[in-house]
Every structure is written in structure tokens, then in C-alpha cells.
Amino acid sequence: MGLVNIKIEGRPYQVEEGLTILEAARQCGYEIPSLCTFNHGECNQGSCRVCLVEATGARGLAASCVFPVAEGMEVVINSPAATTARRTSVELLLSNHNVNCQQCRKSGKCELQNVARLVGAREGMFQGAKTATTYDDASPSLVRDTSKCILCGRCVARCKSAHGNGVLGFENRGFEAKVGPAQDISFMESPCIMCGQCVTVCPTGALMPKSEIDAIDMARAQGKFLVVQTAPAVRAALGEEFGLPIGTPVTGKMAAALRRLGFDKVYDTDFGADLTIMEEANELLDRVRSNGTLPMITSCSPGWVNYCETYYPDLLDHLSSCKSPHQMQGAIIKSYYAERNGIDPKDIFNVSIMPCTAKKFEKDRPQMEVDGIRDVDAVLTVRELGDLIRRSGMQFNRLPEEGFDYDIMGTSTGAGVIFGVTGGVMEAALRTAYKVLEGKEHEAVTFTEVRGFEGVREAVVTMGGMDVRVAVASGMANARVLLDQIRAGESPYHFIEIMGCPGGCINGGGMPIVRHVFLPDEDVDILDTYRQKRANALYAEDERNTLRQSHNNPQIAALYENFLEQPNSHLAHKLLHTTYAERKPFRIAEDKEVPA
């Protein structure tokens, strides 16, 4: 596209044709008050009327988030008519809003709260009845409070764009309108996959992860032995909660913070990722050699597993039977670790710090326990960990660099850390499968052909005299392409990696919210690059690691030698593998084919 000449507040600028007034103004150094401040690509279609400006060619005031720039356009942001209209729009939103801001977990990060300050909204300007509230906290993952919903529709758009799903939608009309699952039912009764992508775009506290901080406080009060493990993607984003640039690795400060929060042992889930690779790679090879069900599909992403159980239950045999890394590590903590240290597993309270809200649902699955002992007792998102650190009074950025605890399960490889980005599980598995089939390490170590954020990526890797065909997808809208191929009997692949969230765990529903800003040293929108910056942090840690293949982890080797015997042994299956079952939410009739 070409450039157009416009004026903003009387000053001339050249901007790219096709931009909205809001986008053009940001590029020119103006921040129009709006509820798109934290925009993630899901436009609210101008329905909130908060970003009104004067613009030539518009009939009356224009909603800058949807009105495109044109040659010769003049935009006035600060006119009396525009500033008054923006303030009135916000005051009308507040009139139907539950303004218990001091008790709201979104306070300080709420877009409505932010824009109310910007426009100078006055308290109580419009009084009247409020829309009836639905409060849904039945799910282990998500909480929906419609008293805080402003009907922007961004959650509806995100669910559809990421997954092709219509789980969220508008119910009723006019004053009775709400956003939620069909018939205003609970998330637990709906086909929701609990990924939390809707939470990342919600501008208020209407959609939030279900907090488990109180459960940790209670466990500490009961004298439990507190063990914590952190997922690979957490280290690449936690610093954002404390003002550090996106993609800043904070592994050492994170370990220091967790230790000061009172956890008795601080471990890295990368160990569990290495363990997953040992089980999963060997499971794949067993299937290939025994003519088992192919393609095999990874099972590390609980959002993806929920999706398969709901929409593609006929393909469940294609899923790897491996538990996800944090569940595997939880099972080892409460068996091998407990036995070695003389601790009753019932006295261990195992906490996982995850980038994902679906992990909260996963830990409560009935299959995720062994002999009545739950693998994982609580899951905190990255945002919850940020809250917990702030509550403690710690100044995160002044913490020293400390390491994880290294007894029994403290060593991990670069293969484990790249689990946090789409394609990482596939690459880690290929590194180990290559060694098993070729009897030597892959010369380049990496398999860069499976990296990237394209919707579907595929590769052919020759090893052991055979061409292994693999594919990678993230976001269910992309995964459906591969799943429909399998259903049709047309899939050419041996192994497929699927992640629930677009981009993988680095873009999980529990990660820090990315504010829409421009980097001072780059002419680029941060929203186009934040996933890559987080991914780069993980790839850099992989490259720094002296161990880069899961099978070279000496503590993994010791675990098999001293406890599990070998991958896919009877004990390994008991502790580290699981089963799946069809989910039947009310909207899917049992006597009909499950829709794709």
C-alpha cells in the first residue's frame, strides 16, 4: 500500500494507506483514549464509542478504531465535542459496571479504569438499574463475572480467530445483553477448552483465571512440604510483570523469588520436559515399528487435549499417552523424590507455575493421580506469580540470580526449555529420535524447519533409513486442517505437534498482558513481535546449555537406572502416562456426529 497525507491536530504526517485513525495516530505519537489500548488484533468494531474524534469525511464524530485514514484527512482529537463525547461514553459504560475496583484483581491493569482516568470520567453521572449478573466460577480455570463486562466482543473474536470455535457469543438483546457460552451456562458445561485466550483480550475483570493463591497459603499454614516447578515459558515473560522489556529472561531472579516465597524446593519443569521426550520419542518409535496408530500427536497442551476430547473424540487413539511435563514431574516428586527423602507424599504440596489456564483444569482431571495421590496440587499463572511476588513486598528487579535446586531432578537440557514455543516439542523429540535411530547425534543439533509461527509447518527428516514426516500447528483453527486430514484417511505424517494457544506456551492464557506500545528504538509494533521476543529468549537459553538433547540429561538417566528401569516400562506407564475420554458438553448431541 502507498502513503497518504493527513493532519493530526493541525500537523502534517504521512501514514500508510489502510490504517485506522487510531493506528495512524499511534504511529505519529498520539494515544487517543480508547478501549483498544491493549488491543491484540480483535477490534471491538467501534461499539464502545470511547475513541471518538473529529475527522473530515465523517458524519459526526468518528470511532477512530474503525475509521480509515484517507488522503487529505484532518483529525482533531482534543476538540471540546470529541473530549466531551469520549467522557460521556465512558460514564455510560460505568453506569452499568460493577465498580468494586479495590476488590477487583484486574485493578491497575484494567483498560476501563485506565481510560476513565484519561477522559476524566465523573462518578455517578448516570444512575439506574444494572443488567442482571452471571457469576461463574465452576471451572477450575476461568471465572466469568458479567457485572464487569462492557460487551466489547473481543473475547468472542479471539475464541473464533484462535480456535474457530463459537463458545462465546452474545446472548439476549438490548439492556439484557450478555457475553458468554450459549444460554448463559457455565464454562464447565460448555465446549470451552479452558485455554484462557479470551482472558488475554478482556479489557476488564469480566474474564479472569481462577486464582489458587489461597490454596498455597492454606498448605503453608498446614505445614505442608511446599515444592514448586516452573514451566519453560515462564522465565521469558515474568519480567514483564515488573517492567522489564518483553523477552527478558529472568530465570535466576525467578528462582530467588520462589525461594523467598517459602517454597522448600524450587525445580525447573524442563526436567519434566526431558522426561516427556524420553517417553514420547520411544512411544513414537514403538508405534512405527509395531504398525501402531499413526500419526501420533503430542499431548503436552491441555487445551488441545480438551479440544480433541470434545470435537474429535474419534481421533483420541492418535494422542500420545504421555502426561504433560508438569504432571510427569509432579508424579515423580510424589514417588521417587518422596521415597528418596523419606517424605510421605500426602505431606507434599506440589505447585506448578504455568503460562496456561488450561493447566488448572488438567491438574483436576481424574486421570492425574496415582494410588489416590494427585500429581499436582495447585497451578499458578505467570500473572498470579507476579501478584504473589508483589504481595510479599519483594523488589523483583533487585533480587540476586539464583539457581534451581539440583538434587535428583535439577538438571535439564536445551531440548526441555524450547517446549515453551510452538515446534519446540517436535524439535526436542526429533533430537532424541534421531539418536535412537541413527546411533549418533544430529550434527546440527537443531531442527529449524519446525520453527516459526506459520499456522501449519511440515518437514521430512531422514533418520534410520526412513523419511519421518512431521507437522506442527498451534491454535485449533490451524490444527483442524491436520485433524480433518486424519479423519479423511489422507494424513501423510508420522508425528504431529499441536499446541492450544497460537504460538505455543509463550502466548498462553496465563501470560502477562501485552500493552499496545511502540518500541522507542524500532519502527515496529510490539504486538507483531512479542511472541518472537519470548521465543528468542527460550532459543537463546537452549543454545547456552551444554546439554541440548533430553537423552543426555544425566539425572534422567539416573531416574531410569534407579527407579523407572526404562522408557515405557510398567512403572513408567503407571506414573507418567494417562488416558483420555470423550467430553460431552450439552451443545453436542450424543446421537449426532461431533462437529469439526
Image (cartoon, grey):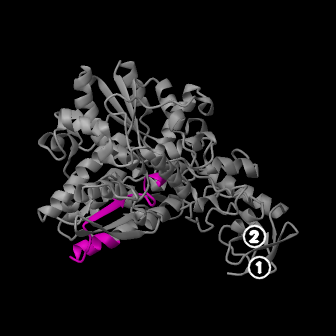
The answer to whether one can see residue 298 in this image is no
Nearer to us in this view, 51 or 185: 51
Magenta region, residue range: 481-507
Q: Within the magenta stretch, is there residue 499?
A: yes
Q: Residue at x 57, y 56 (%)?
A: 530
Q: Residue at x 77, y 60 (%)?
A: 30
Left or right side of 407 for 159: right
Real-space Cα distance between discs 2 and 1?
Answer: 21 Å
State the mark number for residue 4: 1
Report crowding for label 1: few under 14, some 14 to 19, many 20 or more residues within 10 A (C-alpha): some
Q: Within the magenta stretch, is there residue 378?
A: no
Q: Position of residue 307 (x, y in %)?
A: 31, 60
Q: Is residue 55 above or below residue 104?
A: below
Which quadrant would residue 104 be assigned to in this image? Answer: top right
Which quadrant would residue 573 be assigned to in this image? Answer: top left
Left or right side of 174 for 463: left
Q: Amino acid at mark 1?
A: Val
Please give the residue where the numbered disc 2 appears in the rendered image: 61
The quarter of the picture where the C terminus appears is bottom left
For the residue labelled by badge 1, is the local secondary structure a helix, a strand or a loop? strand
For the residue labelled by badge 2, is the local secondary structure a helix, a strand or a loop? loop
Nearer to us in this view, 295 or 541: 541
Q: Are marks 2 and 1 in contact (CB under 8 Å)?
A: no
Q: Position of residue 465 (x, y in %)?
A: 22, 68
Mark closest to the chain's N terminus, 2 or 1:
1
Nearer to us in this view, 210 or 79: 210
Report crowding for label 2: few under 14, some 14 to 19, many 20 or more residues within 10 A (C-alpha): some
Q: Amino acid at mark 2?
A: Leu
Q: Position of residue 239 (x, y in %)?
A: 57, 41
